[in-house]
Amino acid sequence: MDGRPPVVAPPVTAAPQTVTDDQTQSLPDTAVDTSAATPATPSTQGTPASPAQTAGVPDAPTGRAYLRFVLVLGALIAIGPLTIDTYLPALPSITRDLAASESAVQLTLTGILLGMGLGQLLVGPLADAVGRRRPLIAGLALHIAASVFCAFAPSIELLTVGRVLQGLGNAAVAVVSMAMVRDQFAGSAAATMLSRLMLVMGLAPVLAPTLGGAILQVTSWRGVFVLLAVAGTMMVTLASFALRETLPVHRRRRLAFRPVVATYGSLLRDRTFVGLVLISGLMFATLFSYIGGSSFVLQDIYGLSVAQFGLVFGLNSLGFLTGSQVNPFLLRRFEPRLLVRAGVTIGAVAALLMVTSAATGFGGLPLILAPLWFILFACGLTLPNTPALALTRHGEAAGTAAALLGAAQFVIGGAAAPLIGAMGSDSAVPMTLVMALTASLALVVATLTLRGRLVPA
């Protein structure tokens, strides 16, 4: 540590390479920011100027503006998990009402995840070309229309179509939010901002199943989608008046087929970036395996009521919140790369313990729920740091990089839910086995691609 403040959104011209033991002392500040995990102001004593000074980018928010930025962006990002989690208690009733199989109903979850994943590949280059606000507003409008469509869907097939459309709309929110963070923060400062956002958006999976269960007490599952349409209307109003553009015209990239392909190609040639993308995607698959399978496992196999399921789901989600909020304090001492490796290790060990309990019956429900808490803690610790590291490496194409990162998360995560359904629903083994496989693969990828020297910040 040399005492300098972290550089805010430094311009990146090339992705730095993975750091080895003999290269640590020459690590560029733009590769891994190991300074204090707080939003920084530009230094006037030898520290490179931020783009806020050199390129007309709005200054990184501080004080009340920083808090407002966290709350507004966190509320917008929360529309994604709110859309996914609110209807989880309704999955059994959707199965009965639409005369569908469990695997077919789980495809509605896959539909929104695939929509979010593939949609980000389209929205990312668009956000780099036309700015952040317009794709954000358009995506929220699509979310509202798709929610109304789902509320009136007469069949499981049309409900799945509606969920894909919801995912496409939410993709714009996910990409733009991540790009806005990278427009103004980098390194540990970006990881800290993402952790703050996860505190806000993390309340969604805590409250959403309980909210969904309460809605089911007074109306059918269709009322859940009416609520989502109302939430989307509130969010589009908030975005229209409370968020300014963070990408000035002179920093935008030309929207054409060859440049877009070239940008994606340069990202995929960065071995460390690809490793971070895979780690993030596999940890998301671990998370969504739990989201997609928990309602059937906990309600149908372990006999929890809708209200009990909502309570257990919320308590487990506190593990995710705990991991994401411990992260900023750990960033004051350790670099983000070390925290990624610690997170995937905790997740893999806990998942292996959980699948062993499910397969043998040892410990019953408590030995299923306890490892689940630590798995979600590991996700909360890992997921703020992987995008912060990945986007810091490619700040010149933050939208496209965020799109590739998000696409991997939701495509890999979306493949997990039907895999669990195809393996059967008469025990907890399918869900826990998929979670153990994805968490263990994340550990393997981290071991292979993040092998540089990891020292305290």
Image (cartoon, helix red, strand yellow):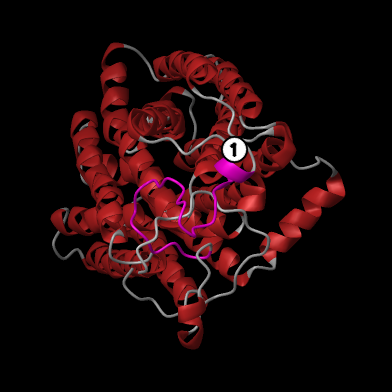
Q: Residue at x 48, y 36 (%)?
A: 105
Where on the picture, by quarter, is residue 333? bottom left
Look at the image and tell me whether residue 207 can be seen: yes
Q: Main secondary structure of the magenta part?
A: loop
Q: Give how far across and how far down residue 349 sits, in percent.
A: 29, 70
Name the amino acid type tagged 1: Val
Q: Is residue 444 left or right of residue 394?
A: left
Q: Is residue 446 left or right of residue 251?
A: left
Q: Residue at x 67, y 32 (%)?
A: 131
Q: Give how far across and how far down residue 46 sits, in percent.
A: 49, 60
Mark 1 secondary-structure assignment: loop
List the residue tagged with mark 1. 57
Q: Give how far across and how far down residue 124 sits, in percent.
A: 66, 42
How many numbered circles does the render carry? 1
Q: Give the quadrant of the N terminus.
A: bottom left
Q: Which residues are magenta?
A: 31-54
Does 161 appear above or below 218? below
* 131 in magenta: no
Q: Is residue 381 left or right of residue 8?
A: left
Does 23 appear above or below 101? below
Does 454 appear above or below 185? below
Q: Give the quadrant of the C terminus.
A: bottom left
Look at the image and tell me whether residue 107 can be seen: no
Q: Residue at x 79, y 56 (%)?
A: 262
Q: Between residue 331 and residue 385, name the one nearer to us.
A: 331
Q: Pointer 1: residues within 10 angstroms few (<14), some, or many (20+)? A: many
Q: Give how far across and how far down residue 226 sits, in percent.
A: 45, 14
In the image, farthest residue toward the bottom: 22
Where on the picture, by quarter, is residue 249? top right
